[in-house]
Amino acid sequence: MPDSKELEDENRSDGYKGKISLRERISHFTWAWFTLTMSTGGISNLISQQPHRFKGLTTIGTMIFILFIVFLMLNMTMITLRFILNPGTLKSSLTHPTESLFFPCMWLSFAILLINVQAYGVPASGPWLLTTLRVLFWIYFGCTLVIGIGHYYVLFSAGQHMSIHSMTPSWILPIFPVMLSGSIASSISSSQPPEERLAIIVAGLASQGLGFLISFVMIALFLGRLMVDGLPAPKLRPGIFMAVGPPSFTALALMGMANSIPQGYTYFAQHPMAKDVLQPLALFFSIFLWLFAFFFFGIATIACLQGVGELYWSLICWAFVFPNTGFAITTISIGNQLSSEGIKWVGSVMTVLLVAMWLFNLGMHVRAILTKTMLWPGKDEDRDELRHKMA
C-alpha cells in the first residue's frame, strides 16, 4: 500500500482537466460524504446537551437538526443515483480498500438521527415515537452487528491486503456503528417504559463493549504505526481525531445507561443497591476514559498545527468535528454528574469552538465542490490508483 506521502501527492495531482458532465460528477459521490451528516447531526446533538442555555438555543439546535435531515436525504439520493447510473459501482465501493472504510459513516448518520429524534422529537410528541425509537433501535442493533462482522471479514479475506505501515484510524470505522448502539441506548432508555429498559441497556452495553475493545486494539496498532513510521502526511492528520471517539462515546454511554437503570424491575428488584453502585462506577470509569480521549485530542491537535502549512481541505477534515462532539458531550455529562460549573463551562467553550469549526468545514466543503477538488476524476476516495497500489 502507498504511504501517506504518496496518497497526498496523488490527491494534489491535477487529475482530469477536461470538462465532465453532471452525471460523471455524481459517479464520484462516495460514502465519505456521510461524514458531513455525522458532523452536522453531532453538532445538533451537542447543542441539545448544553448546560448553559439562552433563549433561542433550542431553536438553533432544531434548525441544525433539520439541516442534518436535509443533508442526509441529499446524501442518500446522490449515492443511490451513483449506483443506478453506474451499475456495478455498489459492489466496487464496498470492496474498495479506501472507500469501503467510509461505508459505516452512513450507519453512523442513522445513529445520530435516532439520538437527535430523542432529543428534539420526544419532548414534543406522544408515546408512539417512543415505540418507534425502540423498534428502530433493535433494527439498528441487529443490522450494524451483522454489517460490522461482515465488513471486517471482507477486509480480512480481500485479495489486496492493507499494510500496517499505512494504517489510519479509519480502520476503526467498521465497528463504530455497532459501538453507537450503546450511545443510542444511553439516549433513549431513560424515556422508555421501565419494563423495556433493561433489554435495551443490556444490548447497548454489550455493543459498547464490543465497539470499544475492537477500537482499542486498532488504536494500539495505530500507535505502533506512529512509533515506526512517524506521523502521516499533513493532509491525513485530521483523521487522528477519530481516535478521540471510542473512549468519549464509551464514557458517555456508560453514564447514560447507568442513570437509566430501571429501579425495582427484574434484576434490579432483586438487587436494589445495584443502581447506587453502578452509577458512581460509571462516572469514575468515564473520568478514567476522558483523559484517554484527551491524549489523542492533544496529539491530533499538535500534529495538525505542526503541519498546517501543508494541510488542505478534504472530506477527512470532518474528523475535526464529529469525534470531538462526543468528547464535548462527555465533558458536559461529567460536569453534570459532579455538579461542577467549571467542567460544564469547559464543555460550553468546546461547543463554541466546534460550532465554529463546523461552519468553517461547511464553507470549505462548498468551496471544494466549486473548485473541482471534489466530485472529480482522481480526487475522491473511489480513485482507482489507491486500489492498484494496495499491497
Image: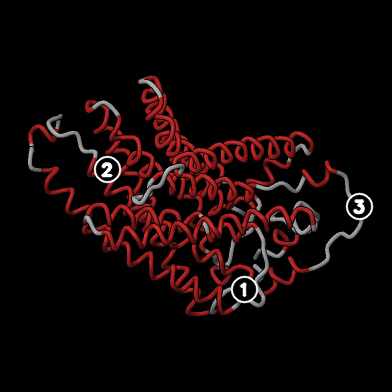
Whether residue 151 is visible, yes or no, is yes
Q: How far apart are the two marked residues, 2 and 1, measured between alpha carbons?
A: 38 Å
Amino acid at the residue labelled 2: Met
**With 173 as the anchor, is 271 left or right in this view?**
left
State left or right for residue 312 relative to residue 209: right
Which residue type does callout 3 highlight?
Answer: Lys
Residue 258, quarter of picture = top left
Instruction: Give how far across and how far down residue 333 sits, in percent.
Output: 30, 52
Who is closer to the viewer here, 91 or 358?
358
Position of 284 with respect to 244 (left or right) is left
Q: What element carries label 1?
A: helix
Residue occupied by mark 1: 234
Image quarter of the N terminus? bottom right
Compare residues 161 and 232 and report the one nearer the observer.
232
Reading the chain from its start, which is encountered first: label 1 or label 3? 3
Which residue shows up at 30% across the image and 35% down it?
189
Q: Mark 2 points at which residue?
A: 257
